[in-house]
Image: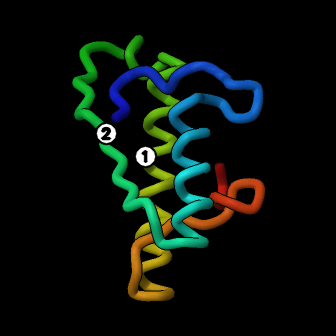
């Protein structure tokens, strides 16, 4: 689950949660397991400074990319999924 913090780099990916997601997605592409669900807690923007927060921007960017990819895949295949990123997720 993401809220305002994206996380810190693992050396391989920008955040540990993203790395875990990409590993699970690789498994899903091969075995159709595990079932993957991503949650984003609603963020209340209280000032313009909130919009300048680098961690929050990364979370919002990730959510937008996942949403765009879901729509693209639904149109293309009639299924929800994500492709690309260094061979795993497009645009990440």
In the displayed structure, would residue 38 be above or below residue 67? above
Can you say whether 55 is above or below 38 in the image? above
Say the numbered circle drawn on residue 92: none
The reply to whether callout 2 and callout 1 are in contact (CB within 8 Å) is yes
The residue that appears at 26% across and 28% down in the rendered structure is: 43
Instruction: Tell me the residue at 60%/49% (across/down).
Output: 23
Q: Which of 36 and 59 is in front in this view?
A: 36
Q: Is residue 10 above or below residue 28?
A: above
Determine the CA span between mark 2 and mark 1.
7 Å
Q: Where is residue 45 in the image (x, y as percent from the top left)?
A: 27, 22
Bin the neighbour count of mark 1 within 10 Å (Cα to Cα): few under 14, some 14-19, many 20 and up: some
Q: Taking 42 as reference, is 77 left or right? A: right
Residue placed under numbered mark 1 in the picture? 63
Q: Nearer the viewer, residue 13 or 33?
A: 33
Pinpoint residue 27: horizontal percent, then vertical percent: 57, 61
Snapshot colouring: rainbow
Q: Residue at x 60, y 72 (%)?
A: 30
Q: In this view, does 67 lie to the left or right of 17?
A: left
Give me the residue at 34% from left, 35% from top.
Answer: 1
Residue nearest the observer in this picture, 44 or 59: 59
- Asked which secondary structure carries label 1, the reply is helix
In the rendered structure, which disc, 2 or 1, sits on the residue that comes first in sequence? 2
Q: Name the residue under label 2.
A: 40
């Amino acid at each position: 689950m993401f809220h305002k913090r994206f996380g810190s780099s693992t050396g391989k990916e920008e955040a540990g949660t993203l790395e875990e997601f990409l590993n699970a997605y690789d498994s899903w592409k091969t075995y159709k397991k595990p079932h993957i669900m991503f949650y984003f807690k609603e963020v209340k923007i209280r000032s313009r400074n909130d919009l300048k927060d680098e961690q929050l921007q990364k979370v919002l960017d990730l959510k937008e990319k996942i949403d765009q990819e879901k729509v693209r895949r639904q149109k293309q295949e009639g299924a929800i999924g994500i492709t690309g990123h260094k061979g795993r997720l497009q645009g990440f």
